[in-house]
Amino acid sequence: MPQSLLARRNAALGAGTPLFYTHPLHLVRGDGVSLYDPAGRRYVDMYNNVPCVGHANPFVVAAMVKAQSTLNVHSRYLHEGIVNFCERLAGLHKSAKIESVIVSCSGTEAIEVALRMARFATGNQGIICSDGTYHGNSELVSKLTRLSLNQDSASEVRAIPFPETYRPLLQGASEAELCDAYLARLAASIDTLQRSGHGVACVIFCSILANEGLPDIPAGFMAKASAMVHAAGGLVISDEVQAGYARTGQWWGYDVSGLQPDIVVTGKPMGNGLPLAATAASRDLIETFRAKTRYFNTFASSPLQAAVGTAVIDYIENNNLLHSVATVGAHLKAGLRARQPAWSAIGDIRGTGLFLGVELIKDDGQKTPDPDLAIDVINRLKDKGFLTSNAGIFRNTVKIRPPLVFGKADADAFLAAWDEMVHEITH
């Protein structure tokens, strides 16, 4: 059956459409952190952040059904639901800078709004990002994906090496010296953009550098980088699509890393499966953007989005998921770190809350990334009933990012499967 389904999929969607795992997994049902194949075999979802409060969450499903069976229209009518939702969303940010919201349907759309917003507000065109990032798929946003550091000096998009302590820019440097070295690269990009005439519109970072592999960031970098960009006349955009919505044990990744955003973008987990994204900023930034674009999105700011988005926030708050994420995540990270000395292939274990990365390296004393081993690991874990993926700039980091309802018992079961996997590989 999977092979016939795969053949039909290739014909219907086109061969080359991405699939996970050497032997693709056919799923038919989800419940909480559990996913099931046609034979009823259970897999623990340790990857998907879209169903952040669990697959088929009945509280969210009820809100979705009620809204869809009552009213669902575009946003050019008054409706209290979307006003309540945007007020709630803005209120989740401690910063007084975040006041108003533009709702969309995908992270790509929300990032594009943020970039255009920054350009309108500053009158500049230059965008700075990391060299290992990914923010979306549109023509503008995709220009930021995995950029070379050796760019055309005339480009309006500049990449800097992402800040990390595991493979540092300077060997033997103190953390403070390392922070300064990365800031110097940011300063050089700012200078290049200013001399080229583009100026600095913004810097955009995932606040915890998720696609870069969740590196430990030199202390103080994000706050100092924010100040440096502000001094150059630019704005700071925090991409919270992966980092936000309680993923780190706090509402926002920037609360963990110290990034100081003017614009915050959220997406995937907001609708627990319903397409929902947002760009939040000051009322002045939002209204300047609206005046220049008269932005409208047929499916955004709908009563359905409002009902589901509000239900997700309610569920996180009513079930104290921030505390659960922090404690369960710390338990899982401690369990993995306790196992690190027993397997030399583990180069580093990183992350916060329920977003962890285990970087796998070759046994050559050079920290050489081992993506082939990472692929082997995630396939073996899948066969044991635990779904992860390999990610990071070298594709050698086992990415662990379960729904927020993942519990301590799930973590302990995963650690047992991890032990079995390591034993198989090393014996």
Image (tube, rainbow, N blue to C red):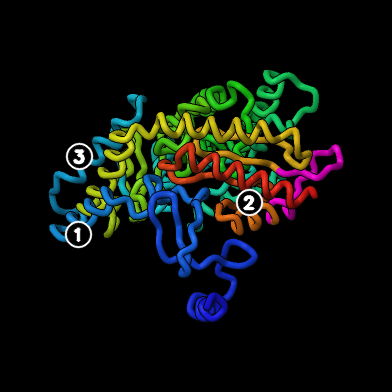
Prevailing secondary structure of the magenta residues: loop
Going 26% across and 51% down the picture, which residue do you hit? 305
Instruction: Using the image as rendered, state which of residue 95 and residue 357 is in the foreground.
Output: 357
Q: Which residues are magenta?
A: 360-375
Query: In what element is the residue under mark 3?
Result: helix
Where residue 394 appears, as percent x and y from the top left, is: 70, 48
Instruction: Using the image as rendered, state which of residue 246 and residue 151 is in the foreground.
Output: 246
Mark 1–mark 3 distance (CA, rounded to whole Å):
18 Å
Mark 1–mark 2 distance (CA, rounded to whole Å):
37 Å
The image shows residue 140, relative to residue 201, as above or below, that is below
Amino acid carrying mark 3 in the image: Asn
Give the mark, 1 or 2, whose residue is nearer the N terminus.
1
Where residue 88 appears, as percent x and y from the top left, is: 26, 35
Instruction: Using the image as rendered, state which of residue 174 and residue 420 is in the foreground.
Output: 420
Would residue 154 be visible to someone looking at this image?
no
> Badges 1 and 2: C-beta atoms under 8 Å apart?
no
Amino acid carrying mark 1 in the image: Gln
Residue assigned mark 3: 84
Where residue 186 appears, as percent x and y from the top left, is: 63, 31
Does the magenta-highlighted stretch encompass residue 364?
Answer: yes
Query: In what element is the residue under mark 2?
Result: strand
Amino acid carrying mark 2 in the image: Asn
Label at residue 68: 1
Q: Nearer the viewer, mark 3 or mark 2?
A: 2
Give the mark, 1 or 3, whose residue is nearer the N terminus.
1
Residue assigned mark 2: 390
Near mark 3 (Cα within 10 A), the count class, few <14, some 14-19 or many ≥20, is few
Query: In what element is the residue under mark 1?
Result: helix
